[in-house]
Image: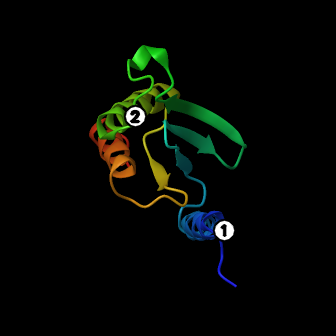
Amino acid sequence: MALSKRDLFQKRRLRVRNKLRKVNAGRVRLSVHRSNKNISVQLIDDVNGVTLASASSLEKGLGIVGKNNVEAAAKVGATIAERAKKAGVEEAYFDRGGFLFHGKVKALADAAREGGLKI
């Protein structure tokens, strides 16, 4: 029986996360979520189970509410890099979840790298 699109996504998400967890034990995770209308990102400390910083295209201060394109993703990436510095995080590993690394997800990662976050 063929798996549904959602089942394939969950399978890919768990595969990516488990592989990254083995290699990057003790580091902060930069987790990305992309929907059809928005993109959001969180810096998560899995050891303590807390979110250190977050950024989203839903924030009015960024001026991109209602937009979900590559430029909006780049702005969110630059914002999370800035907030990571304030939180004292310089290095994180990039958890793309089940999303493919191209387009908006890639733009977010590149902007975070340009902002000084090592991922």
Task: Answer with left or right where residue 32 lies relative to residue 106.
Answer: right
Decide: is 60 above or below 79.
above
Q: In which quarter of the image is residue 17?
A: bottom right
Task: Answer with left or right where residue 4 lies relative to residue 65.
Answer: right
Q: What element carries label 1?
A: helix
Decide: is 8 above or below 71.
below
Quickly name the residue at label 1. Answer: 7
The 10 Å Cα crowd at callout 1, few under 14, some 14 to 19, many 20 or more, is few
Question: Sequence-wise, which precedes: disc 2 or disc 1?
Answer: 1
Quickly name the residue at label 2. Answer: 81
Front in this rendered view, residue 106 or 52: 106
Position of residue 44 measured from the top left corner of the image (x, y, whole percent): 61, 43
Task: Answer with left or right where residue 87 lies relative to residue 104.
Answer: right
Closest to the camera, between mark 2 and mark 1, is 1
Task: Residue at 40% x, 30% y: name it.
Answer: 67
Front in this rendered view, residue 26 or 21: 21
Task: Residue at 72% x, 43% y: name it.
Answer: 48
Decide: is 100 above or below 67.
below
The kind of residue on which mark 1 rests is Asp
Q: Quadrant of residue 75?
A: top left
- Quadrant (top left, top right, bottom left, bottom right) of the N terminus: bottom right
- Please give the count of numbered marks on the rendered protein: 2
Task: Residue at 60% x, 66% y: name it.
Answer: 5
Position of residue 87 measured from the top left corner of the image (x, y, whole percent): 52, 28
